[in-house]
Image (cartoon, rainbow, N blue to C red):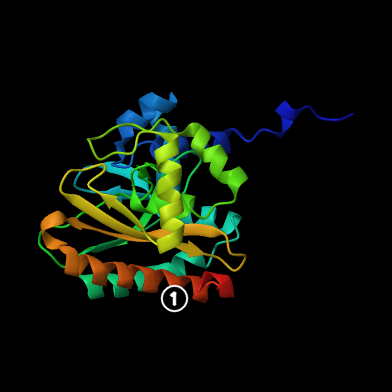
Amino acid sequence: MEKSAEGYKVPNLEKGLAVLEYLSLRPKGESLQAIKAAVDLSQTTVYRILNTLVRLEYLMYNEDTKRYRLSMKLLNLGFRSLNEHNLLETVIPRLSDLRDRVKETACFGVLGDEKGLFIEQAQGHHSFRFMLSPGKPFELHCSAPGKAIMAYLPNTVRDRYLSYMTFVRYNARTITTREHYLEELEQVRKQGYALDNEEELSGVICIGAPIFNYTGYPCGAIWISGPKDRLPKEVMRSSIASVKEMAGVISSELGYKRMKNEE
């Protein structure tokens, strides 16, 4: 006699996953009491789950704030499921190389379910620099990495992401129509890089370029972010060249071969 699906349940595993899902929505982490209330479990049970996840390095615990938050281990598992397990280890040292060259914060991101997802950064050398939390989403219509990836997606995939986009206006420079955005993506394809020219935050400029895997698919993007006054025209030109060059190096290390008609 076959057992019902109910008979195959593992309650403790379900409880642990509930904790992970809850914390995935809280990048700054949460306290034991907050987690206990959210997942509706006893304090003893939650404490054991949290300690186990910390021991296995899926969570990190901050002694000062008494908060638990997700570690990068889950992110690495996600990459492996996408067959891009060597992507992060290839990108990280190159981010540092790019940062050292341009002095500004260098970042790496990929596409999520509906928006982009920030993954990693090499912080700039200036005292004032930009910092992001891993897993933070970014808009596709007004960000340099969003445009850089979207410009090279197959039409069917690009159209799916376009269907999710609401083109939120952040200021007068923000692209707010599908037609204007498609024109922008065509320009990105022609020049090989994308700009966020103060389109989300006034006074902030980002320069991004796509990363391609061995199949030629845009599996992510790298970009730099800096205040407008540190990126005058001459610095912009050299920074664009550096971002494009580093994106090409990373793509080559992932097995991408540029076609002759892309030269």
Classify residue 181 by image quadrant: top left
Q: Which of the pair 258/69 is nearer the observer?
A: 258
User: Which residue occupies 23% across, 63% down?
Assistant: 123
User: Which residue occupies 30% across, 67% down?
Assistant: 240
Any part of residue 85 in sight: yes
User: Which residue occupies 52% across, 64% down?
Assistant: 212
Any part of residue 71 in sight: no
Taking the image as shown, residue 224 lies to the left or right of residue 55, namely left
Image quarter in which the N terminus is found? top right
Residue 43 position in % (x across, y down): 38, 30
Taking the image as shown, residue 54 lies to the left or right of residue 6, namely left
Q: Which of the pair 71/146 is nearer the observer?
A: 146
Marks counted in the figure total 1
Which residue occupies the extreme right position in the image? Answer: 1
Residue 26 position in % (x across, y down): 34, 37
Residue 71 position in % (x across, y down): 39, 52
User: Which residue occupies 39% across, 26% down?
Assistant: 38
Q: Which of the pair 186/208 is nearer the observer?
A: 186
Indicate the secondary structure of the residue bearing disc 1: helix
Dot 1, crowdedness within 10 Å: few (<14), some or many (≥20)?
some
Q: Which residue is mark 1?
A: 249
Q: Is residue 24 above or below residue 102?
A: above
Residue 40 position in % (x across, y down): 43, 23
Amino acid type indicated by mark 1: Val
Q: Which of the pair 86/171 is nearer the observer?
A: 171
